[in-house]
Amino acid sequence: MGAIYLVRHGQASFGKADYDKLSDKGCRQSEILGQHFKQLVEPDRYYSGNLLRHEQTANYFMSGFGGRDLATVTHSGFNEFNHVEVLVKYRPEWQEFNVMAADIAKEVVPRKAFQQAFSDAVTRWVSGHHDVEYQETWMQFKARCTAALSDVISQSSDAKNIVIFTSGGPISVMIQQILKLDDRETLSVNQVLVNTGVTKLLFSDDRLNLSYLNNYSHLEIANGDWVTYR
């Protein structure tokens, strides 16, 4: 039986025009995870989505981990959904980042106001009532992510420990497949996933099970305030 470790990326640049880039804290979170992993297992295969925050998380993880120099296989199936498109379809005026930033800044609690707007935007996308407006529907996104996981498993019969650097959305829908969750429960899982949190799956030829979800003990035992969600 093999193990797959799904790693959510480090903290990205929330509130910046280029969200995809890791913050300084996100870089350090990833390095802390690599240092922690060195005490646990020796991965024999790495995969990553091809977003910048995935690649940076992988790079800083490797810096902390050291060990064997293994190439990371890029797989776009592990990419997050297009959050900008999902948000703009809900609030078209936010096509311009400066307009969105100005609107949010007017709120009493800007971060909370943005989170509510984003949650409403995702709910609209997931509903399926507006599928013609999106380049990738919720159903297509779920199919893409679960197919990517199946690809890795089919190619990894000889692997014991696989690490995949990805995002909260893909992790959530993979868990949905395993635990047979509904969409509402899946979105709830996504909301609590911590940056660089690790979800472990166990797989064999005909079985796929969840071992644990959203483990971020590496951040809790590190000195400093490292636990973030966005």
Image (spheres, rainbow, N blue to C red):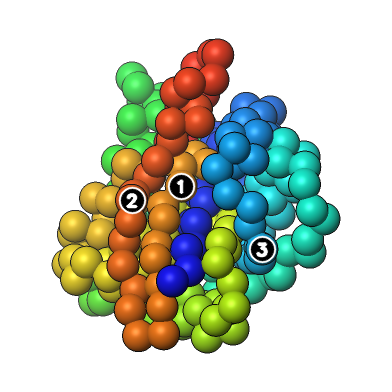
Amino acid carrying mark 3 in the image:
Asp
Expressed as whole percent of the image width and height from the top left, the position of residue 70 reads 78, 61
Badges 2 and 1: C-beta atoms under 8 Å apart? yes
Give the amino acid type for the residue marked by disc 1 in the picture.
Val
Number of numbered discs present? 3
In the picture shown, does residue 71 fall above or below 111?
Answer: below
Toward the viewer: 43 or 99?
A: 43
Q: CA distance from mark 2 to mark 1?
A: 8 Å
- Disc assigned to residue 198: 1
Q: Looking at the image, is mark 3 or mark 2 earlier in the sequence?
A: 3
Amino acid type, residue under disc 2 in the picture: Tyr
Of all residues, the one furthest to the right in this rendering is 69
Which one is in front, 52 or 162?
Answer: 162
Q: Nearer the viewer, residue 15 or 95?
A: 15
Question: At 59% from the left edge and 72% from the top edge, which residue is drawn?
Answer: 159
* Residue at mark 3: 44
Q: Nearer the viewer, mark 3 or mark 1?
A: 3
